[in-house]
Image (spheres, grey):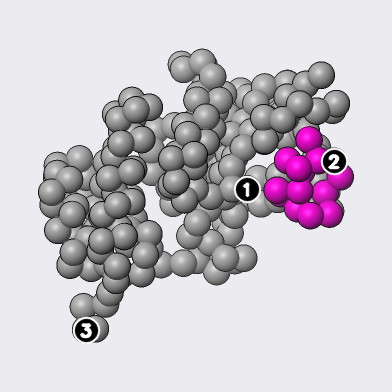
């Protein structure tokens, strides 16, 4: 008996039926990523100049094809982010997936995510992008932008300043402050030391002219 890496349920094959249905209602099977972990790291390095996402962790942009039953790497219009095993930090995908599950249990809204097998048997983490609907890009402003911080100064702030930003820009500031507290608590519990201000308020941001 195996454990589904998408739902953590016991399953006969690689994935549970409920895990497959999370990706597509009509899905009955899932092909391995046709790259090994080392291949994915190589591809991530080669495609990095085309990626709009920051961070030192190797990552790939992908779409999911229900017809082909697999994730496919793309340079543009990706709907998912893939993160392979990293030789510098063992079990990094498993750690990230578990952290997201803990966040969901704590009541934090998280995107569709899970782990899938690569051709060498290793697990790769996947997460759906919240700033994409089909091929349409959704404009997003995070706390770094609202605070006027740059990539170099995105850690130079405080939770008090974030709370003031919520008061100034969010449609429902009380709701957002509860979410901020919950998010802060979860990050403390899981030992997340990379909690910079490149996160976004969850409810609608008021325009300056409203």
Which residue is painted at 67% across and 35% down in the image?
A: 7
Dot 1 or dot 2, earlier in sequence = 2
- Whether residue 192 is in magenta: the answer is no
| Secondary element at image label 3 | loop
Does label 1 or label 3 sit earlier along the sequence? 1
Q: Does residue 104 appear left or right of residue 194 in this picture? A: right
Spot occupied by residue 69 in the image (x, y as percentages of width and height):
81, 46
- Could you tell me how far apart the alpha carbons at marks 1 and 3 are, in whole angstroms? 37 Å
Magenta residues? 16-28
Tell me, yes or no, whether the two marked residues, 1 and 2, touch with CB atoms within 8 Å.
Answer: no
Whether the residues at callouts 1 and 3 have beta carbons within 8 Å, the answer is: no
Pointer 3 residue: 209
Mark 1 falls on what kind of element? strand
Q: In which quarter of the image is the C terminus?
A: bottom left
Label placed on residue 174: none
Residue with the mark numbered 2: 29
Give the image location of residue 89, x and y in percent: 46, 17
């Amino acid at each position: 008996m195996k454990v589904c890496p998408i739902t953590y349920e016991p399953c006969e094959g690689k994935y549970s039926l409920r895990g497959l249905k999370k990706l597509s209602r009509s899905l009955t099977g899932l092909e391995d990523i046709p790259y090994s972990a080392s291949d994915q790291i190589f591809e991530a390095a080669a495609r990095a100049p085309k990626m709009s996402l920051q961070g030192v962790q190797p990552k790939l942009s992908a779409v999911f094809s229900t017809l082909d039953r697999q994730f496919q790497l793309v340079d543009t219009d990706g709907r998912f982010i893939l993160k392979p095993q990293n030789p510098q930090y063992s079990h990094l995908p498993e750690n990230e997936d578990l952290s997201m599950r803990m966040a969901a249990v704590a009541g934090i809204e998280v995107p569709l995510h899970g782990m899938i097998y690569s051709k060498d048997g290793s697990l790769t983490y996947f997460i759906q992008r919240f700033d994409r609907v089909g091929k349409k890009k959704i404009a997003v402003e995070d706390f770094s932008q609202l605070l006027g911080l740059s990539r170099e100064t995105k850690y130079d702030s405080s939770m008090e300043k974030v709370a003031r930003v919520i008061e100034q820009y969010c449609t429902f500031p009380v709701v957002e402050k509860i979410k901020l507290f919950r998010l802060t608590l979860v990050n403390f519990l899981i030992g997340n030391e990379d909690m910079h201000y490149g996160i976004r308020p969850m409810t609608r941001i008021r325009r300056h002219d409203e």
